[in-house]
Image (cartoon, rainbow, N blue to C red):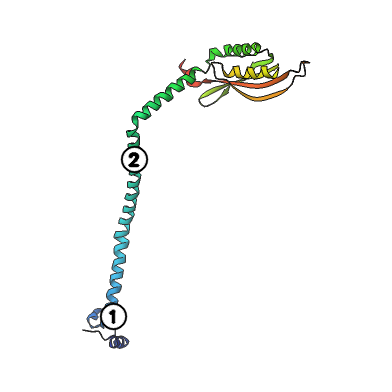
Amino acid sequence: MAIDWRAELEQLKQVDLDLENMGSWPLLVKLVFAVMCSVFAAFLVYYFVISDQLDTLEHERNVEVELRQKYQLKYGIAVNVEIYRSQLAEIEEQFQSMLKQLPTRHETAALLDDMTYVGTANGLRFDKLEWQPEQQQEFYIELPMQLEAAGQYHQLGQFVSDVASLPRIISLHDFELQADPDSDKELLKMSVQARTYRYKEAEEQQ
């Protein structure tokens, strides 16, 4: 049966909305009231029930993503574990080889002799060759050596090359090259800091 909306609107002007006599309300009022009650009930259900569950769902989704990432990482490691073990063994071997190139506390004096020998073998004149104070680093001890030598250009170049070929690791820093004021043979004077290193853990084990 069709609803006469015009008649319903006319009734609204005269209706007395008595909550104790809702049965006598016009149909339109009943429909509006029913819609409002439904909306309010839906809001209460969402606020007190669904919203908490949505937060829980979002948290669980984030946990799932994190667990998937951890799984993929661990799976990648497990699949390549033999490769990683081989690489680790190779790195350990390289590390031990490098440690053998670092002088021990008892070998530093011999290293100074090696530097002197390399210099004199190349015809250099040493004006200064002495150890500087040790520099403590996190994993190693830095041993600087201040060096001043005079010679011809090719002699100085060969000296640097021979130092790099020594069995112990030595790095050269802070080069200064100028004409030797104490020579009339057009010699060059080189000032440089040579550094070698000792491994702390190796010393603690000795």
Q: Note whether 16 is above or below 44 in the view shown.
A: below
Q: Quadrant of residue 30?
A: bottom left
Residue drawn at x 60%, y 19% as measured from the top left:
161
Q: Cα distance, mark 2 to mark 1?
A: 60 Å
Q: Position of residue 176 (x, y in %)?
A: 69, 24
Residue drawn at x 32%, y 40% as measured from the top left:
71
Name the side, left or right, on which 171 lies relative to 189. left
Residue drawn at x 32%, y 56% as measured from the top left:
54
Q: Secondary structure at mark 1?
A: helix
Q: Note whether 41 is above or below 148 in the view shown.
A: below
- Residue at the spot of label 1: 29
Residue 53: which numbered mark, if any? none
| Structural crowding at the residue carrying mark 2, measured as other residues with C-alpha within 10 Å and reported as few (<14), some (14–19) or many (≥20) | few
Q: Quadrant of residue 81?
A: top left
Label 2–label 1 contact, CB within 8 A:
no
The quarter in which the N terminus is drawn is bottom left
Q: Note whether 41 is above or below 192 in the view shown.
A: below
Give the residue type that dot 2 points to. Answer: Gln
- Residue at the spot of label 2: 72
Q: Position of residue 183 (x, y in %)?
A: 77, 15
Dot 2 or dot 1, earlier in sequence = 1
Q: Note whether 3 is above or below 177 in the view shown.
A: below
| Structural crowding at the residue carrying mark 1, measured as other residues with C-alpha within 10 Å and reported as few (<14), some (14–19) or many (≥20) | some
